[in-house]
Amino acid sequence: MRCERARELMSLMLDEILTPEQRRDLEQHLGECVGCRAEWKLLKTAQRLIATTKPAPMPYDLVPIVMERVRAIEREQTKTTLWLNIFRPQWRWLAAATMPIMLALAIVGIRLWHAPNSEPPESIYWSAHVTNAAEVAVAPELVPISIALSSLPFAGEKQ
Amino acid sequence: MKRRASRHETTEQRVETWHQFLPLSQWTDERLVEAAQAGNQDAFAELVRRYQSKIYNLALRYTNDSETAIDITQDAFVRAWQMLPKFRGEANFYTWLYRIAMNLCIDRHRRALVRGEPQKVSLEDLVVERQRFEDSEEETDLWWEETETGEPEAELLRQEMREKVWEAIQKLPPLLKQVVLLREYEGLSLQEIAKITGTNVGTVKSRLYQARQHLKKLLAPYFNA
């Protein structure tokens, strides 16, 4: 067996995933090759040293800090959710139904706001136009008032 | 058979029902994750309590800096909380958590590279004679590693060698360091490491092999008599 192949098998042996045949071949090579034997010893020792390394203690408990950040995230999400609830599926049909009505009202409102100044209709003229107080039948006690009123100019009447 | 099946179901249902009466510290990870996904923050706090030390040590071994390791540990759990709705239980919780932590470690390393922070010595700078192994006529006598007793001298030397191994691991390229930490320090299986790193078992084996070849070159001066 060549040393290059032996090195590959050494890595697999450290992970304990060799087949029995591979293990036998490697052990045979290690018995014959001093260099590979030294390499194997180094790797095995390093692995053992790592395995006996004690974990470092936590400087302090992170649970309160982490949970405070989690609560802050939840508070932010709750604020966002309140706004987004408007667009939830069960409210979309209501929005879709009221949209045309709102649009129509908006258009009418705009038209009324911008309506040009126009002359009052003829019916108004007709009902307000009195040329002669005598043509109008009024109570006798109201005659002086009707004569006074008939002399007043009406809207749109040319003097 | 029918009777046995129903008895088994009843037992499982009974265990499931009784779970809620047990203290959180006795809940399984799966149960805690389910509760946390339903919004139970106390269940998530229990998960943090269980794994904060492991994640801290993983981050510390990767970054070799306690403050950075603390930041990464916090960020890992906060990110886990945010991504909890997407966790479907296809992997163990701790495997999934390790993956988050590992990605954060690698991100930090990349940002440090971009910022131009001083990097560890590259392997190419180290000149180690492979020939020393091939030509040595005597086997290396590592008396301190054979000693099982608590001899102070031997223990001191072992501790010193542990630090050398640690320093050597810090000099590995990020992807190789990642697999060594997960395999040798965390004791994870090759399949678990493959899931954490987003690769396959073959890639993990290959990286472990390369990492060990690098470590051998780095540690050779200290292991030769």
Image (cartoon, coloured by chain):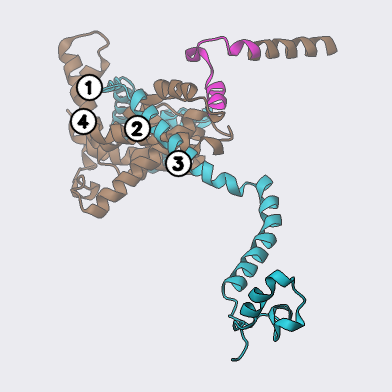
Chain colours: A cyan, B brown
The residue that disc 3 covers is B197
The amino acid type found where label 3 is placed reads: Thr
Q: Are marks 4 and 3 in contact (CB under 8 Å)?
A: no
Are discs 4 and 2 both within one chain?
yes
Are discs 4 and 3 both within one chain?
yes
Question: As drawn, is B25 to the left or to the right of A90?
Answer: left
CA gap, disc 4 and disc 3 = 26 Å
The one nearer the camera, B157 or B19, is B19
Chain of the residue displaying label 1: B
Question: As drawn, is B166 to the left or to the right of A21?
Answer: left
Nearer the N terminus, badge 4 or badge 2? 2
The residue that disc 4 covers is B164
Q: Considering the image in quadrants, where does the N terminus of chain B appear? A: top right
Chain part drawn in magenta: B17-36
Q: Is mark 2 on a helix, strand or loop?
A: helix
Nearer the N terminus, badge 3 or badge 1? 1
Q: Position of residue B184 (x, y in %)?
A: 37, 29
Q: Are marks 4 and 2 in contact (CB under 8 Å)?
A: no
Chain of the residue displaying label 3: B
| Disc number lying in front (4 or 2) | 2
How many other residues sit within 10 Å of disc 4, few (<14), some (14-19) or many (≥20)? some
Q: Do the residues labelled 3 and 2 touch (CB within 8 Å)?
A: no
